[in-house]
Image: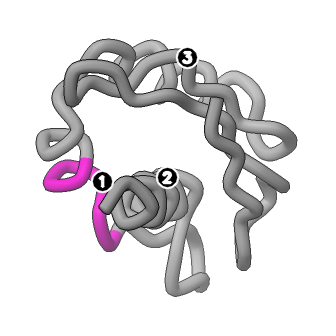
Amino acid sequence: MYTYQTSGVCARKINFDIKDDKIINVEFVGGCNGNLKGISSLIEGMNVQEVISRLKGLTCGGRSTSCPDQLVKAILEKLEDKL
């Protein structure tokens, strides 16, 4: 399980795994509970690159980021750590 500390959003952290280039076990801690459970459910088992292309750069209100965008940052950080 990889844990990412978010920045600039309501969720405090994101836990997830990557297996066979697929996102699994996504859990947001804090934030809009129902919406984040929905996002987690929708991307469960989705290819990493698909998640990145769909969620990268999304904003929330007047913020320059969002919980989905923070997930992309977390995924990219995890992928960098694998190199």
Please give the residue where the numbered disc 1 appears in the rendered image: 55
In the rendered structure, which amino acid carries the disc numbered 1?
Answer: Leu
- Residue at 80 percent across and 59 percent down: it is 10
In the rendered structure, which amino acid carries the disc numbered 3?
Answer: Asn
Please give the residue where the numbered disc 2 appears in the rendered image: 71
- Nearer to us of marks 1 and 2 is 2
Mark 1 lies on a secondary structure that is helix
Graded by Cα atoms within 10 Å as few (under 14), some (14 to 19) or many (20 or more), the crowding at tag 2 reads many
Q: What secondary structure is the magenta-colored segment mainly?
A: helix
Question: Is the Cβ of the residue at disc 1 closer than 8 Å to that at disc 2?
Answer: yes
Image location of residue 16, percent across then percent down: 57, 31
Apparent side of residue 50 relative to residue 44 in the rendered image (left or right): left
Please give the residue where the numbered disc 3 appears in the rendered image: 25
Image location of residue 75, percent across then percent down: 41, 52
The span shown in magenta is 52-57
Mark 2 lies on a secondary structure that is helix
